[in-house]
Image: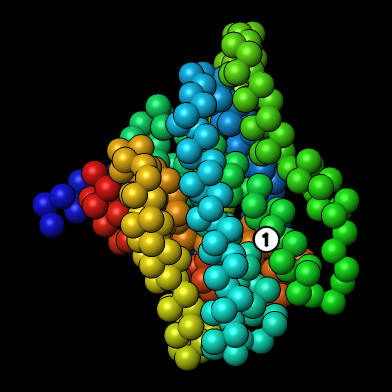
């Protein structure tokens, strides 16, 4: 218990910003447009700037980042394919099965994950956190979307999938940042200073935006939250613990602890937005995003204690 409170104190300020967003969301003048503007700022400016700054200062290590990419990719791919026997066993309808493909492939590794890792281990963890987020983004917009479309009514268009991936601003920033880091290119100081200003603003923006999203969701009936609670426990505890057990046979925990913590993040807003776009079970996805985010206030400090 004595170790829990320092870990809780490292996480709590982030959730205070989220709860501030929840409170502000109750104001009738706060519309969904607020959420859209803040998310677009984070997606197109804030996180790309943070990624560029972090990767431009990266000392590239092929062994470390190669292991990171492989281990996290295996974790995501296996989680997605585990949905098939799980859905067959519990006889889930196709709409929910397609929703789960997205829900297990992408936790809130960027909007919440990067601030949490930064709070726990300082700015030196930023390049690693950025790389982990990039791996999750890649698989979400490739295999995750492929599974949704493959089990849907429409034929999979690989060309659209490819161009959607290329147009993602966060992945574009990753490619540019890696090119700069690997080739030891020095960016102009005036550019770096400008990027630092934007990057410094993104944490508060995305956490406040997350709070607005949580506050705008309807409560619904109690019985509707039972499967949501079970699935939230799975993504917050069960899947990360399995990842920890398996990866522990190949990688030292001092290396993989940030990977495990990112895998224990609650459901992100991106899968919810994709559920709306593909006419999936957006209500289930929104409730998982809300409940798992609230539960993460306890689960993430517990993971920090365990991993430290």
Q: Is residue 249 left or right of residue 22?
A: left
Residue farthest toward the front in the current orientation of the protein: 249
**Does the image show residue 172?**
yes
Report x, y in % for residue 45: 67, 35
Reading the image, the residue beneath label 1 is: 144
Q: Is residue 241 left or right of residue 210?
A: left
Report x, y in % for residue 173: 67, 31
Q: Is residue 102 left or right of residue 222?
A: right
Q: As displayed, is residue 71 above or below residue 269?
A: above
Classify 10 Å Cα crowding around label 1: few (below 14), some (14-19), many (20 and above). many
Residue 88 image-quadrant placement: bottom right
Front residue of this view, candidates 39 and 81: 81
Front residue of this view, candidates 226 and 294: 226
Q: As displayed, is residue 42 above or below residue 197?
A: below
Q: As displayed, is residue 88 above or below residue 186?
A: below
Front residue of this view, candidates 222 and 265: 265
**Does the image show residue 110?**
no
Report x, y in % for residue 206: 55, 47
Residue farthest toward the left in the current orientation of the protein: 2
Q: Which coloring applies here?
A: rainbow
Q: Secondary structure at mark 1?
A: helix
Q: Is residue 78 left or right of residue 31?
A: left
Give the quarter of the figure containing the N terminus. bottom left
């Amino acid at each position: 218990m004595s170790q829990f409170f320092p870990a809780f104190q490292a996480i709590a300020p982030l959730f205070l910003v989220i709860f501030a967003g929840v409170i502000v969301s109750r104001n009738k003048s706060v519309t969904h447009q607020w959420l859209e503007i803040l998310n677009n700022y984070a997606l197109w400016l804030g996180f790309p700037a943070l990624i560029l700054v972090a990767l431009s200062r990266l000392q590239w290590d092929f062994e470390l980042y190669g292991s990171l990419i492989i281990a996290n990719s295996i974790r995501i791919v296996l989680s997605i394919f585990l949905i098939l026997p799980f859905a067959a066993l519990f006889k889930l309808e196709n709409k929910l099965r397609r929703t789960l493909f997205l829900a297990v492939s992408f936790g809130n590794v960027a909007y919440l994950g990067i601030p949490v890792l930064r709070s726990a281990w300082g700015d030196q963890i930023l390049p690693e956190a950025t790389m982990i987020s990039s791996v999750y983004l890649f698989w979400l917009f490739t295999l995750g979307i492929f599974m949704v479309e493959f089990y849907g009514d429409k034929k999979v268009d690989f060309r659209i999938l490819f161009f959607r991936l290329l147009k993602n601003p966060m992945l574009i920033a990753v490619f540019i940042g890696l090119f700069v880091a690997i080739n030891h290119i020095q960016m102009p100081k005036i550019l770096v200073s400008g990027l630092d200003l934007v990057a410094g603003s993104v944490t508060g923006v995305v956490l406040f935006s997350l709070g607005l999203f949580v506050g705008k969701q309807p409560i619904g009936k109690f019985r509707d939250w039972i499967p949501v609670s079970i699935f939230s426990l799975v993504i917050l505890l069960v899947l990360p613990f399995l990842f920890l057990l398996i990866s522990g046979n190949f990688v030292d925990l001092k290396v993989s602890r940030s990977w495990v913590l990112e895998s224990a993040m609650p459901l992100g807003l991106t899968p919810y937005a994709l559920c709306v776009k593909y006419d999936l079970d957006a209500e289930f996805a929104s409730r998982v995003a809300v409940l798992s985010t609230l539960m993460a206030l306890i689960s993430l400090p517990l993971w920090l204690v365990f991993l430290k």
